[in-house]
Amino acid sequence: QVQLVESGGGLVQPGGSLRLSCAASGLSFKAFAMGWFRQPPGKEREFVAARGWNSDTIYSNSVKGRFTISRDNTKNTVYLQMNSLKPEDTAVYYCAARPAGSSPTMYNYWGQGTQVTVSS
């Protein structure tokens, strides 16, 4: 059974930083591309960042230069380092996994989400 468990969310002031973690189990981690998505209040879920099995990365324009996605294949964990946070980054953040080589829109597995609130 595949499980993705996010952690690290919380309340942070504008300009601050947070690091989200997503621990994966039940899958061959190295064979999966990992992504982060978010759903702001009252809005649809949106793509944030992804990192492939071969370390290729892609970011949404709204977070490029502020967020960094990384993965540790020895720990089956993917991270999202978020710097220079803005109130508009407030959202529930989700970790997701898809088999390497599959369509970038075909994420099969999802975590339960972790809340990030950016407010003074």
Image (tube, grey):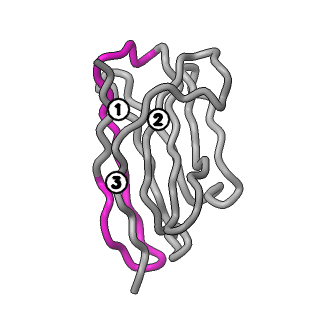
Q: Are marks 3 and 1 in contact (CB under 8 Å)?
A: no
Residue located at (60% from left, 27% from top) = 106
Q: Horizontal and vertical percent for residue 49?
A: 58, 44
Q: Secondary structure at mark 2?
A: strand
Q: Is residue 105 above or below residue 31?
A: below
Earlier sequence position, callout 3 versus callout 2:
2
Q: Horizontal and vertical percent for residue 112?
A: 34, 44
Q: CA distance from mark 1 to mark 2?
A: 11 Å
Amino acid carrying mark 1 in the image? Thr
Q: Within the image, what quadrant is residue 75 found in?
A: top left
Task: Compare residues 41 and 86 and report the one nearer the observer.
Answer: 41
Query: Closer to us: mark 1 or mark 2?
Result: 2
Q: Which residue is mark 1?
A: 77
Q: Which residue is mark 3?
A: 114
Q: Which residue is mark 2?
A: 96
Q: Horizontal and vertical percent for residue 88?
A: 56, 72
> As drawn, is 19 to the left or to the right of 104?
left
What is the span of residues highlighted in magenta in the rendered image?
8-30
Q: Are marks 3 and 2 in contact (CB under 8 Å)?
A: no
Q: CA distance from mark 3 to mark 1?
A: 15 Å
Amino acid carrying mark 2 in the image? Ala
Q: Is residue 22 above or below residue 55?
A: below
Q: Can residue 28 be found in the magenta stretch?
A: yes
Residue located at (33% from left, 25% from top) = 76
Q: Secondary structure at mark 1?
A: strand
Q: Is residue 39 above or below residue 73?
A: below
Q: Within the image, what quadrant is residue 92 found in?
A: bottom left
